[in-house]
């Protein structure tokens, strides 16, 4: 634990306890754990919130993890690495806590595993990447595709869509039209879409003054492909376990719907291509046949590219958009996609309703006849437990 004479310092607007001799690196890493606890885990994953707050005040654990990955990625990688070990040994005390069979404090067994098996944890952190692939995000992507389709039809373009997902992991969201989605406002169902008999059943709360654009669904999809540095093979049991390890414990329904989505993908796996977004995305899009409208999809993937990488991707797509019609649907933290306009205040206020995750901005950049247009479609939970649609977004004017 940190020195009892610890004093408070401020990092990214948060107060973080730090010992008198804590290095700047340890301070930054501790601050990152606290940010996650405050913004993402609180009210959503109590197990991870407890671990994150305890680890932020534990110099020995911070030192162990400090150089395993870039500081921004270290906490989620560490949590996934430990979770992967836990899933491989379901009879342990920590496994019971993660599965909800025990209400014991998760921090002592987590810390014991972290230190006693540090080589295994660090090896996973250094050789793997976070692969959340949350299928709940399909509840936001479907109305976004409806907006793309509506704009195309208004221009007299009836071509089917060709999905190109950036950082798709196992490509589960490429199968979005094979899931059933129910949108609710309070206790009332306001809309449904998808296959009602699907083993993947998603529920999304509608907030704010408008409802998601669902007219025209299902849209015709001619092809699906994902581009990832390390795509996940759903036929590999170790790879499937890593997908589950990237989930947060204590969140109802996520493990079951992930398992159901994986089973669907195993029956008809989407095409996944190994490649880098900066250098390989634009050529992949440009090579699609002329009888489709390419739609590039990014859900919390651009965040991993860095500012220069994101600018390069957007510039490359601008180049492709100068010669053919296409669209970019992004679901990212607002600061990651500064080209997407801010939603109106009544929509932004919906993200403050319960503070259960970093607000995610659903944006659309479309290129038609060489002209790019940007639109904010919605604000939503990062796993799309809720969505607040921008009034009039996606409607043809």
Image: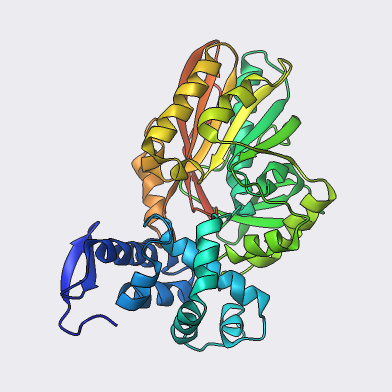
Q: Position of residue 215 (x, y in %)?
A: 66, 34
Q: Residue at x 36, y 66 (%)?
A: 33
The residue most toward the right is 267
The foreground one among 278 and 323 is: 278
The foreground one among 372 and 349 is: 372
Q: Is residue 315 above or below residue 144?
A: above
Q: Is residue 114 above or below residue 358?
A: below
Q: Residue at x 30, y 76 (%)?
A: 59
Q: Quadrant of residue 186?
A: bottom right
Q: Quadrant of residue 396?
A: top right
In the rendered image, is residue 95 in sight?
yes
Q: Position of residue 180 (x, y in %)?
A: 73, 51
In the rendered image, is residue 257 in sight?
no
In the displayed structure, does residue 88 sit left or right of residue 127? right
Q: Residue at x 62, y 17 (%)?
A: 154
In the displayed structure, does residue 20 sit left or right of residue 1? left
In the displayed structure, does residue 172 sit left or right of residue 20? right
In the displayed structure, does residue 273 sit left or right of residue 385? right
Q: Position of residue 284 (x, y in %)?
A: 64, 26
The foreground one among 73 and 376 is: 73
């Amino acid at each position: 634990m940190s020195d009892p004479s610890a004093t408070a310092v401020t990092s990214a607007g948060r107060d973080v306890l730090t010992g008198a001799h804590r290095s700047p690196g340890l301070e930054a890493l501790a601050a990152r754990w606290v940010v996650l606890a405050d913004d993402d885990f609180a009210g959503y994953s109590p197990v991870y919130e407890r671990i994150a707050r305890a680890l932020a005040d534990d110099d020995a654990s911070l030192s162990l993890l400090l150089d395993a990955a870039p500081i921004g990625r270290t906490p989620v990688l560490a949590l996934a690495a430990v979770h992967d070990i836990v899933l491989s040994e379901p009879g342990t005390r920590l496994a019971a806590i993660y599965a909800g069979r025990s209400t014991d404090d998760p921090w002592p067994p987590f810390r014991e595993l972290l230190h006693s098996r540090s080589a295994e944890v660090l090896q996973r952190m250094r050789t793997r990447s976070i692969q959340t692939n949350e299928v709940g995000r399909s509840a936001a992507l479907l109305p976004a595709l409806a907006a793309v389709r509506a704009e195309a039809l208004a221009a007299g373009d009836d071509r089917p869509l060709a999905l190109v997902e950036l950082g798709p992991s196992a490509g589960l969201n490429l199968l979005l039209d094979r899931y059933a989605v129910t949108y609710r406002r309070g206790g009332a169902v306001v809309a449904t879409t998808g296959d009602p008999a699907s083993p993947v059943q998603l529920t999304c709360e509608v907030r704010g003054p408008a409802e998601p654009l669902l007219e025209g669904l299902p849209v015709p999809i001619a092809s699906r492909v994902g581009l990832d540095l390390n795509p996940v093979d759903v036929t590999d049991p170790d790879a499937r376990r890593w997908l589950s390890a990237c989930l947060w414990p204590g969140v109802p329904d996520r493990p079951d719907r992930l398992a159901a989505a994986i089973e669907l993908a195993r029956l008809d796996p989407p095409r996944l291509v190994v490649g880098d977004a900066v250098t390989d995305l634009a050529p992949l899009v440009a090579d699609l046949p002329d009888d489709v409208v390419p739609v590039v999809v990014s859900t919390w993937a651009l965040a991993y590219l860095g500012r220069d990488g994101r600018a390069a991707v957007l510039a490359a797509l601008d180049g492709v958009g100068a010669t053919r019609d296409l669209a970019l649907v992004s679901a990212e933290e607002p600061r990651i996609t500064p080209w997407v306009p801010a939603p109106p205040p009544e929509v932004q206020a919906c993200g403050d309703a319960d503070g259960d995750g970093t607000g995610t901005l659903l944006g659309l950049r479309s290129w038609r006849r060489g002209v790019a247009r940007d639109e904010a479609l919605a604000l939503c939970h990062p796993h799309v437990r809720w969505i607040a649609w921008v009034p009039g977004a996606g409607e043809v004017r």
